[in-house]
Image (cartoon, grey):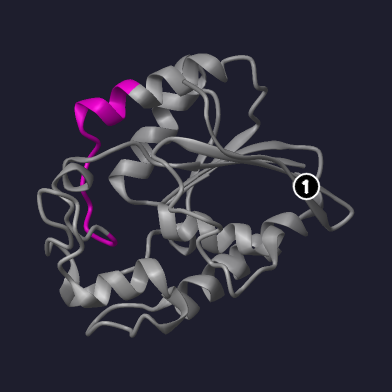
Amino acid sequence: MKLYILRHGKTQWNALRKVQGAADIPLAEEGISLARKVGETLKDVPFDLCFSSPLKRARQTAELVLGRKADKIPVILDKRIQEIDFGVLEGTQFKDEKGNMINREMETFFTDPNHFSRPENGENISDVLARTREFWMEKTADPELQDKTILIASHGCAVRALLQNVYQDPENFWHGCVPPNCSISVVEVKEGKAVLLEDDKVYA
């Protein structure tokens, strides 16, 4: 099994530095363009199927990366790989125009995520780790998927949570950074053992 784990392209809220989790924001033109470039680079990858977060920005990115093959490759939506739900923080600005952090809760999220408190009506890192872990265990153990090449379209925090099943480094959740927009990490799974082949690569 080979997994191409993809973060969605850039949205307008990314550019505006707004908190974007469960909010269903579409790709910006820049995000569409980059996803198309990634798709062109990966056009010869023999994808068998795709699992995507149901959120629009992830689904759009998956379809653009799959390109002309999108109508032939099943895209299966799964809420377990949806982005963290920030609850009442959704849509608030967390950085100023100069890129300085102006929201203490979000600063904790990015600098000390394991101590990010669950916002009202939202989730914390443990919640995302639990649901992405369930997805990971189910799919990597599925005998029908063992010989498949699979695209997984998700989000920054959810991608890192999924990849904790490979890194196994709970004290370093972000693995150095938030995955760049449209970056892909490639993981090969054989007999239950996962090996990271590419890490946060942008194919553009």
Of residues 52 and 202, the one drawn nearer to the viewer in this rendering: 202
Q: Residue at x 62, y 64 (%)?
A: 164
Quadrant (top left, top right, bottom left, bottom right) of the N terminus: top right
Q: Residue at x 36, y 24 (%)?
A: 34
Q: What element carries label 1?
A: helix
Q: Quadrant of residue 140?
A: bottom right
Magenta stretch: helix, strand or loop mostly: loop
Q: How crowded is mark 1: few (under 14 residues within 10 Å), some or many (20 or more)?
A: few
Q: Position of residue 167 (x, y in %)?
A: 68, 60
- Residue at mark 1: 144
Report the side of 9 relative to 44 (left or right).
left
Can residue 70 be seen at all in this image of the molecule?
no
Report the side of 40 relative to 35 (left or right).
right
As for residue 192 lying within the magenta part, the answer is: no
Report the side of 74 relative to 189 (left or right).
left
Q: Looking at numbered disc 1 in the image, what kind of residue is underneath it?
A: Glu
Q: In this view, does 137 lie above or below 127?
A: above
Number of numbered discs overlaid on the protein picture: 1
Q: In this view, does 80 lie above or below 183?
A: below
Q: Where is residue 33 in the image (x, y as percent from the top left)?
A: 31, 21
Q: Which residue is drawn at 65% across and 31% down?
A: 48
Of residues 37 and 114, the one drawn nearer to the viewer in this rendering: 114
Q: Where is residue 154 in the image (x, y as percent from the top left)?
A: 45, 49
Q: Where is residue 39 in the image (x, y as percent from the top left)?
A: 48, 21
Q: In this view, does 32 lie above or below 134?
A: above
As for residue 26 lying within the magenta part, the answer is: yes
Q: Which residue is drawn at 14% across and 49% down?
A: 98
Can residue 46 be seen at all in this image of the molecule?
yes
Magenta residue span: 21-33
Of residues 17 and 62, the one drawn nearer to the viewer in this rendering: 17
